[in-house]
Amino acid sequence: MTDIAIGTRSWLDAVKPYVEKTPLAALFLGISSGFPFAMIGANLSSRLAQDGIDKKSVTAFSLVLLAYNLKWLWAWVVEGVKLPLLHRLGQRVSWMLLAGVLVMAAVVNLALVDPAADLMATVRAAILLGVAGATFDIIIDGYRIEILRPEQLGIGAGMSQYGWRIGAAAAGALGLVLAQYWDWTVAYLVCALFALPAMLAALVVGEPERHREIAGRKSGGELVQAIIGPFVDFFKRKGALLVLLFIIVHKIGDTLANLTFRLLFNDLGYSNEEIALYDVGVGFWALLAGIFVGGVLYARLGLKRSVLISLVLMAISNFSFAALAAAGKSNIGMAGAIGFENFASGIGGVAVVAYFSALCDLRFTAAQYAMISAAASIVGRFLTGTSAGALIERFGYVDFYVLTTVLALPGIILFWLMMRSGLVDSSVGSAATDEGGQAPA
């Protein structure tokens, strides 16, 4: 059993990695990873709602985020294709720079469309940003896992999630404020700059030492391995299908709930400035506390118990929004719901993401994590886009968020069974070892 699974470090060792170079780099990677999601998620929802688009159409736009669930289809390109000229910087660094430029261009494109005048043009622009953002995520995740040592995976995952929330919340809040005082075009143009932190981090840190080139014949063998290798390696492991089932079901309730928060806030009568204040203010500090607590729990309790605790807390956080919906507009209630949701997400960002990172093989880090992260939210995201708005209109917000809490239970039960059977220990890959070989069971 590995140390990352059982947790053996002291309290000092649990805090020290927060100030090390590569976990700090993971923070900047997360900032750039989070902002495209806000541009086509919360901000676009607010933009469409303020333009008078109906709820069903607003929630249907979340289907654009399915690009993040389909990114495994083209992850092999990032893994196996060498970019002309830029490749001298390294496979990971070169793709980081290209993907960052593509995201910035896609955000600018979305800034220049008018949803009220041409909804289909907005759809096309959102899809382009979804694909560009998902490609950016492929390289960001692969780069993050490879620059971190095995014992840093928990803290690095937490710092990345911290950065993701900073990027998403800061871009979301900045977008709301700029839209209120200027317009949405200006808001999107300014927010395009959030792609820069990841690009700069890659240039400063450089190509990861743990990156493993894909083996294969020079006449296309590497490309074939980049396409099929990630799947062959993952599915030949003991209990692979059960692990995949957990990945798919563990976040259904959370994904279904998260993309509807802005609709709830708008219907409760909160202003843009109030939403920005509580998302950035209360949410920021609660997330900071959650990540710190998650890092300590991960180091002291190990991977298994910290993941189980985070799953339970994330389920309860969904119920807090049912309570807010029942109470009506309340600044204290909104602060409590957002605060607890961010605290639970901070803990989950350390534990769950660390487990998913540890599942990867260093030869196929970007492609395997793309597959894992895509599977983690595809069901919830599909349900959000196809039925969330209709469910809210039919049952109301209170029953809707109670339903999302119930949907979190299968993931909790399944992970507990995986712990009991030893499958959690035996499912990790070479990213969980210093040597880059198969992790011990």
Image (tube, rainbow, N blue to C red):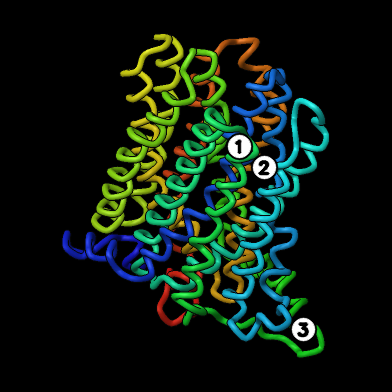
**Amino acid type for the residue under numbered disc 1:** Gly
Say above or below: 86 vs 123: below
Residue type at mark 3? Gly
Asked whether the residues under the numbered discs 3 and 2 touch, taking CB atoms below 8 Å apart as contact, a structural biologist would say no
**Viewed as shown, does residue 387 lie left or right of 425?**
right
Q: Nearer the viewer, mark 3 or mark 2?
A: 2
Residue pointed to by mark 1: 41
Q: Taking 70 as reference, is 278 above or below it?
A: above
Q: Do the residues labelled 1 and 2 touch (CB within 8 Å)?
A: yes
Horizontally, is 351 left or right of 11 in the view?
A: right
Q: Label 3: which residue?
A: 221
| Image quadrant in which you'd find residue 156 | bottom left
Residue at the spot x=47%, y=36% of the render?
173
Say which quadrant the C terminus sits in. bottom left
Q: What element carries label 1?
A: loop
Which residue, as the protein is rendered here, is positioned at the far bottom? Answer: 218
**Mark with earlier residue (3, 2):** 2
Residue linked to disc 2: 65
User: Looking at the rendering, which quadrant does residue 256 occupy?
Assistant: top right
